[in-house]
Image (tube, helix red, strand yellow):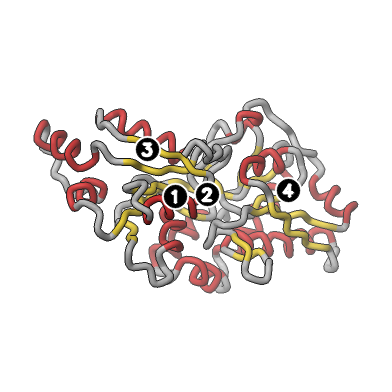
Amino acid sequence: MGALRTLRIGLLGAGLLAALAAPLAASAQTLEGIKAAGTIKLGFIDGLAPLSAKSGDGKATGFGIELCQHVAEAVKARLGLPALNVRLVELKAETTLESVAKGEVDLLCTPTVETLKRRAGVSYSLPVFNGGIGVLVRADSPRAMRDVLNGKVAATGPVWRATVNRGLANHTYVVRAGTVTEEKIRAGFRQLNVNIHVITVDDDAKGVELVRARQADAFFTERVLLLDKVSRGTTDLLVLERRFNAELMALAVGRNDDDFRLLVDTALSKLFTSAAFAAIYTRSFGAFDDATKATYVGFSLP
């Protein structure tokens, strides 16, 4: 396991690079730079379907990509450049936010969780997705562990704590390294005083395979990503119903450029309240029900 390198940025549940602890301000003239270059650069992280990924033909796809394409259309209209080139740039996970902070891309299309630490280096759009930590286990995993992870154990003082310990102790859990998820999971188990072993990985595929290969008992990461991993006829793995928290995710932009951020938020607000948005959401996540519609109306700004 020591060969698994540390991931410096996560999601969807994820921490900011230490290098971004001090602000790395991008140019305050993003729109002018786009106009001068004749190109808007949209960054994304591969392998995070349904948020962002590369398809078989190498094209970037996913919910965040579609949102960015609408923003790009708004930029074209603002600049009066209908032929503006839209360039999708695949970024390395460990340096993604640094790339945004340095202005190497104009907008990060992979939604990430906004934190105070991250805001030292980048700014964020209005929320684009209501995420949260989920957990993947094997279908034949111990019932006691699944019950506790699903929150089915009654909280009745010492008996509850003993039941939790029996359900969770002496297991191996996987998290993405350097992420908000890792911080929350470690803190939660420390609070319960449960003896566990934690493995960190640098991508979701490794976490899934460790559970499948019985080298780990559960994998914690953004729940929507886990659902995508088990939606293709998987029978040996399952994602539990419980979501351990709520994490608003947004698109990262360079700091100190309120004009560009305002344009991004305006484009997103118009999209979220349009008739076209239901189809975009459904392609990535499934049914666009009334509760989801109300959420996005709440995200949008008047």
Type of amino acid at the residue the image marks with label 3: Ile
Dot 4, how many residues are within 10 Å of its Cα: few (below 14), some (14-19), or many (20+)?
A: many
Type of amino acid at the residue the image marks with label 2: Asp
State how far apart marks 4 and 3 are (Cα): 35 Å
Kindly report which numbered mark, 3 or 2, lies closer to the viewer in this rendering: 2
Kindly report which numbered mark, 4 or 1, lies closer to the viewer in this rendering: 1
Dot 1, how many residues are within 10 Å of its Cα: few (below 14), some (14-19), or many (20+)?
A: many
Q: Residue at x 41, y 68 (%)?
A: 231
Quadrant, the C terminus: bottom right
Q: Which residue is mark 3?
A: 185
Of marks 3 and 1, which one's residue comes earlier in the chain? 3
SS for dot 3: helix
Q: Is residue 203 left or right of residue 196?
A: right
Q: Which residue is mark 1?
A: 207
Of marks 4 and 1, which one's residue comes earlier in the chain? 1
Type of amino acid at the residue the image marks with label 1: Gly
Of marks 4 and 3, which one's residue comes earlier in the chain? 3
SS for dot 2: loop
In the picture shown, does residue 76 fall above or below 187? below
State how far apart marks 2 and 1 are (Cα): 7 Å
